Amino acid sequence: MAKRPKLVVLSGSSNAPLSREICEELDVPLTPVNIERFSNENISIQITESVRRKAVFIVQSLYPHPNTMLVELMLLVDAARSASAAEICVVMPHYSYARSDKKDKPRISIAAKLFARTLEAAGADRFLTMTLHSEHVQGFFDRPIDHLLGSQVVCEFLRKRDLSNAVALFDLGQDKRAGSYAEELSLPMAVYDKRRVDDTTVEIRSIVGEIEGKDVWVFDDEIASGTSIVAIANAIRAYEPASVRVACTHGLFCGRAPEILEGAPVEEVVTTNTIDIPEDRRIPKLTILSVAPLIARAIERTAAGKSVSGLFRK
């Protein structure tokens, strides 16, 4: 049997703390990368150690500054390919452009598909992602892709809590993803009908399910501006629940989101570290869980030529 290439991990600048955690889990050093930004806003990438005939895993979330992080990622892939890497796996804990996944208006681009193909053209052999906005985004990649679920990390944390009076509340359009949380935690379900007015404003039309007197957990894939959470929480409060808590995989917390969430009528916000949340943007009610152990196990299995499917549930 042919010997598998040695594993190395590179990191872009989007989430260096997560990259270091992943390397600690793998017990490998983080391979140094020199990322230089010039006065004309061009970016230069240099891998400062040899990756010849090695299995290269490049960790980069596309947030904050998704356009800059995307260019960094493409340059990292190209540099690894030029340096004769044996294989290149792009590890994107958060793929921000996954939200642009359908042609819902005339004459618009489907960025999720475009950038998937761009990264493949740069030289990526396979991909590892976490909690895409929609499952079908995986179909935009022609190379192998493994889709991990941040809900596993959240559920593992919540199993240690008293959920005897809890109910899981979801957006009506995410019933499939809702099932994974509710099934894993053995919770009854309720749904809300949400209509988006614009990028930061939503309207809650109705809530279906028994939430009066319950500890309501609102689950979503990401929190961006925080205004949707305020709208949902206010709608829930009209039903006089015992408490309202929120959990998501990707905590973007754009702009005034920390301030908005701190003032929102929710007792707790749980997210993961797919996004690097600076200390000055962390609020007292926020709990951040690490996805590093799950990603590290997936990298180990990929590097060994084994299936990753056993690490996550559909």
Image (cartoon, rainbow, N blue to C red):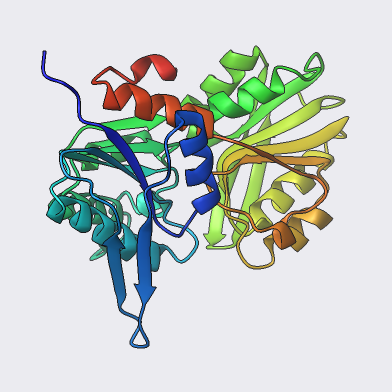
Residue 14 image offset from top left, x and y in percent = 47, 58
Name above or below for residue 281 compared with residue 242. Answer: below
Q: Residue at x 30, y 51 (%)?
A: 112
Q: Quadrant of residue 79?
A: bottom left
Name above or below for residue 203 compared with residue 178. Answer: below
Q: Residue at x 42, y 45 (%)?
A: 30
Between 281 and 76, which is closer to the camera in this rendering?
76
Name above or below for residue 2 compared with residue 191. Answer: above
Would you say 154 lies left or right of 71 here?
right
Between 170 and 40, which is closer to the camera in this rendering?
40
Q: Residue at x 31, y 57 (%)?
A: 73
Residue 67 visible? The answer is no
Residue 117 visible? The answer is yes
Q: Residue at x 61, y 55 (%)?
A: 202
Q: Quadrant of the C terminus?
A: top left
Would you say 200 lies left or right of 113 here?
right
How many numbered discs, if any?
Answer: 0
Between 283 and 13, which is closer to the camera in this rendering?
13
Residue 25 image offset from top left, x and y in percent = 50, 30
Q: Quadrant of residue 100?
A: bottom left
Residue 230 image offset from top left, x and y in percent = 73, 52
Name above or below for residue 143 compared with residue 279. Answer: above
Would you say 273 lies left or right of 144 here?
right
